[in-house]
Image (cartoon, rainbow, N blue to C red):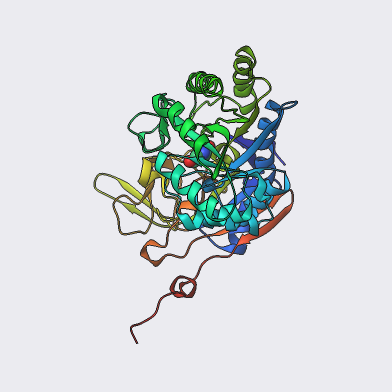
Amino acid sequence: MSAAIQLPGHPFVAYRGHALHTEDVALDALADQYGTPLFVYSKASMLSALAAYQRGFAGRSAQICYAMKANSSLGVLQVFADAGCGFDIVSGGELDRVVAAGGDVRKVIFSGVGKTRAEMHQALAAGIGCFNIESEAELEVLSGVATGMGLRAPVSIRVNPNVDPKTHPYISTGLKGNKFGVAHEDALRIYQHAASLPGLRVVGIDCHIGSQITETTPYLEAMDRVLDLVASIEAAGIPIEHIDFGGGLGINYNNDTPPEADALWLQLLAKLDQRGYSGKKLMIEPGRSLVGNAGVCLTEVLYVKPGEQKNFCIIDAAMNDLPRPAMYQAFHAIVPLSDKAGNTPTVTYDVVGPVCESGDWIGRDRVLDVAAGTRLAVLSAGAYCMSMASNYNTRGRAAEVLVDGKAAHLIRQRENSQDQMRHEQLVG
Ligand SMILES: *Cc1c(COP(=O)(O)O)cnc(C)c1O
């Protein structure tokens, strides 16, 4: 067998003997067994991404809370729950998933600008670790809900450090003009308000500046701004037990070069120490960087359609499976499952799905050697793909497989039409 050829950013996906593998499992065999489109995740890849953070925090008091909106499939959550992670949730539904996956609810933090009273009640009853509060109005409501239950809700306030994360505007969250968090200049007053409310117990401070961040500087700037606030809040007599620096670290989609998690935290922790906050408990909420490059989406070419201006490669995966290109003009690398032909591809295609929208493209201007029946892998498909998948065009959501060494576990069955119509009824 020839030496394995690794794919950029995907340490556990490689060609072996011309066949693309995730860990020790040939992807073509999985496509035969489960059909396409099919998401395949590497457990070792997730654990190795997690290990980089764990190395970074060695010897510190720190809690890693996987931001599960990136990929909330139960089999994925189970990997992180078993590894001792907490979870960053943004809905009551996500809390139900944590419980179903065997996660520790005491390690759950609840983020999001629009928590309902019912969700607050559910999270308080479950005994989650902390609410990340995003507005002054929310403080009042949470205090009321907690008081009604005879409880005090543990809270941190998400502050908006007004730092440009230099990422796509739809995934930048820490600038003025975003709906997230409270303004830096209002933060002290809002902390004083929180400390005065009977149903709340202030425990921390939180910030999250955006997603797919590939530079270290925005994090360092945000940390400085947050530590400035910690100083003034504590000077006002309100102790801060933990500092939550959010998530947002990018992955390599297309020659992106984000810092490694351990290297990033080496610099951030140096700043923390330098400013005299070594003793604080740290929380982080990484999502994409834990799962994004652990996953690929297998798909089959249905038709090749030469066009007047463009050639189209029509595949059986679509924007309902892989929404990021349509939503963010995002790039996903697309590679063949088998490179046995050995030909150098020469034809350029737009790779598109079957959905009736011009926005239904997966890759533009890709040079590929394809015919009907050729199988392809869409890379970097572990984050914000299945968790954003929809049933548009009454397309059932794809199946999912978790690979662990030589073993492949089906963690989600393909959805059929009956599944999709289950809660609908005709007018009687
Ligand atoms: C989405 C989100 C995260 C995770 O972001 P990634 O870019 O996936 O790491 C963390 N915290 C909050 C509050 C979020 O909304």
Q: Is residue 227 visible?
A: yes
- Toward the bottom, the furthest residue is 428
Residue at image point 38% right, 61% down: 392
Spot occupied by residue 283 in the image (x, y as percentages of width and height): 62, 33
Check the image and name the residue furthest to the left. 308
Instruction: Please name the residue shown 68% across and 50% down the image.
Output: 104
Which image quarter is the N terminus in? top right
Residue 281 occupies quadrant: top right
In this rendering, the count of numbered labels is 0
In this view, 257 is above or below 202: above
Residue at point 45%, 48% (across, down):
141
Q: Position of residue 152 (x, y in %)?
A: 58, 46
Q: Position of residue 265 (x, y in %)?
A: 62, 23
Picture quadrant of residue 169: top left
In the image, residue 25 lies at what x, y percent? Answer: 68, 51
Residue 269 versus residue 203 in the image, above or below:
above
Answer yes or no: is residue 385 visible.
no
From the viewer's side, name the closer residue of 157 and 143.
143
For residue 357, which quarter of the picture? bottom left
Lateral position of residue 56 relative to residue 308, left or right? right
User: In which quadrant of the rendered image does the C terminus lie?
Assistant: bottom left
Q: Nearer the viewer, residue 190 or 304?
A: 190
